[in-house]
Image (tube, rainbow, N blue to C red):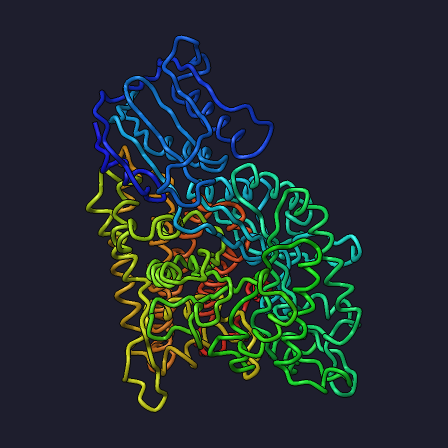
Amino acid sequence: MYTPKDIKTLICPVPQQVTALNDQPLVLTNDRKFQFRAPAAQKGPAKTAAETMQAFLTQTCGEDCFAEDGLPVTLELGTAPAEVKNEKESYRIRVSAAGVTITGFGESGLFYGVLSFRQMCRWTDRSAVIPAVEVLDWPDAPFRGYKEECRYGSNMMERQDWLDMIDALAEKKINNLCIALYGCWGVQYDGRVAEYLYLPLKKYPQLKTPMTVKYWSPSEDKWYDYETLPPIYRDNLFGELVRYAKDRGMDVIPGINSLGHNTLFPRMLPEVAPKDEDGTPNPTSFCTSCDETYDLLFSIYDQIIDEYLLPNEIYYFNVLLDEVEDGYGINPEDPYSLSHAWCQCPECRKKERSELFIEHSIKVLKHLKEKGMKSVMIAHDMLAGKQSKLGYVADKFMVRIIEEGLRDVLVLDWWWYSDVKEILDFHVMPDELGLRSFTSPWNGYHIWSLLTNPLRNIQIMAEISHNSKCCEGHYLYSMWDKSYDRVHDCFGDYAWNFEGTGTVDDATERYVARHFAPMQDEVEHAFRLVNWITENRKARHDPEAPSQGVLSTSGALIAMSYYRTCYFNKDEPYPRHFPGSLLSMAILPRRWDYERVMYSVASMAKEALAIFEKAIRTPGCDQDMARRMAYECQNYQVLAEDWLAFLKIYDLTQNGDQKKIAPIARARQVARLSLMERCEQTKDLFFVRAAGMRNHSVFMQTFADIADYIESTDEPKLDLLDITAITSPELRNLR
């Protein structure tokens, strides 16, 4: 039998109070009968709570497990004790030999209580013995949010993937899900701007963002190459997701980029585009002096509010307003031209950029407040971020917000994604502005490249929020991937129970106990290795003194991933040379540091991989998560060893027998193919179809092309910094 302390480990997020009762434990067997009682509910979290408990009992004890003379299992709604915070999401569980009572102090609390009871039932063979305990639990933060960005991964998620994500987030007691419905980045793959629209717009049916799928499938021995619309757009899924999440105590918040990260709208509708002084439209941002801009934006907002939010009693809207910047690689017709985000039409050029930003924000906020929105989220970076091209304009912004009566609805999203607190990118702290606020760490985001470890970032941002008077909670900027499960558990812990969470190592220890108890020490060591592989540090690179400072391992790995090379660079040809661009501009000038990263990562990843492969074979370990972590560790190892091979090949091109290159390249092709097979066997199909397998395919085909060239040429003269002349049609198509 396990103890109340064990229960505090098993429940996620970590609960506030677990108290032992002076009673006999509850013994469950798979032939047990239950007298089940629950509040009658036609919809909402109370209905889902009853359905979830019934499904759990049926799954463990059979379809015929319900009887009037069975063990009482009661779900009820009640009044919260005085010490409980955020009572609508709070609950109490009482377990003894006489039965189980789960009391929710609100419907969401009842649902969370059921989830916690299910988590604390540790079954061994055909039975579970639960100590007599009382769990009294409530969240510290009233807002615990997750933002799913519109990017590689979510662009390929099918209906069931979205529902599974919502269920997984509900298990961590996340109560707000922001789904980014529109966002854009610069030119990347195929010479196309990366644009995402996830909701059909009634007034603008011509606006669509087809996605390209290109990769080699080792398991099927064929190339995939096709175009498709994002399934959430194709099947118009947003309304169903809103309702499904609402039944799990979760409000869905729409995210619409409303100034920055906006290229589809101005490119397809030039009347809303910012203009140069000669009237030429730019394909990014908006003209904020023309009525057509607000006809477009407000029609989108109103469609979402009227059809999805107000009918489901949701009053949040996210307009983002982050990173409004001039840039290259934004115009697909001429990526080398500089695209201007700030309009220079006769009206706009009368005002400073800060004034344009503030006036636009006011218009958007006023409209959304008039439409019934009680909380409108915008990012902090254009107002109080040190990197903002506008400088610090928060004070001017605050004056206007107060004048316009918008302080009650505005919520500032303070985002920052580093593990190094000394370089925090805030001009001021949230309480110095006094606006309603969230702190926003991230989950690592780069799922298409490699798994990272932002636990320290989450802890730093949670501490800021916990100690702030105006912060209402936490908001995780993310791309969905179940491999980030440990990260999501840690985020859930700090958002729900900051003091009880302890350190990030404490959070990892609890996670391993839940998923890998038979191998606790070994798997904790494996996660320590993963932490070191993805370590982040304050690194300063001085070109005049390249031997000074040490690269962050995570920064070096992300730089070595293909994803960084597919971004446009105005000083290089497009597509950029691969691997030549990274070799010449980053790795060779600082070879001593990158090589250190490659060797250390390869060694640590190999050791961690062996541990997770053992966990796959060990009864009592979470085999799905073990498989996922094994893939991630093999991904680290292959990436590091691929670049070590590129360095060996480069050395041979400079002074050596180039015929020796072929076996090196061929071996790396085989190693990458092995990783790709594991990817197809392990990762979700939406990951495979998005950029993950495409990036793998670029590495694989690059090594294949090099080997083919060397093997077929009597006196090869390979230039690794520019392999254009030997590039196959398959590799050109991928890039």
- Of residues 497 and 600, which is closer to you in this image? 497
Residue positioned most to the front: 82
Residue 316: where, in percent of width, then height?
Answer: 59, 53
Residue 648: where, in percent of width, then height?
Answer: 33, 72
Residue 502 can be seen in this image: yes
* Number of disc labels: 0
Q: Is residue 226 left or right of residue 673?
A: right
Q: Is residue 306 left or right of residue 525?
A: right
Q: Residue at x 28, y 84 (%)?
A: 547
Q: Residue at x 46, y 34 (%)?
A: 111
Residue 453 can be seen in this image: no
Query: Split into 4 quadrants, where in the image is the C terminus?
Result: bottom right
- Of residues 655 and 541, which is closer to you in this image? 541
Residue positioned most to the bottom: 544
Residue 482: where, in percent of width, then height?
Answer: 43, 47
Residue 515: where, in percent of width, then height?
Answer: 31, 40
- Of residues 157 and 348, which is closer to you in this image? 348
Q: Is residue 283 left or right of residue 652?
A: right
Q: Residue at x 49, y 62 (%)?
A: 437
- Which corner quadrant of the image does residue 299 belong to? bottom right
Image: 398 above or below 516: below
Q: Residue at x 63, y 75 (%)?
A: 358
- Of residues 665 and 350, which is closer to you in this image? 350
Image: 39 above or below 666: above
Image: 413 above or below 136: below
- Which corner quadrant of the image does residue 72 belong to? top left
Query: Split into 4 quadrants, where in the image is the N terminus?
Result: top left
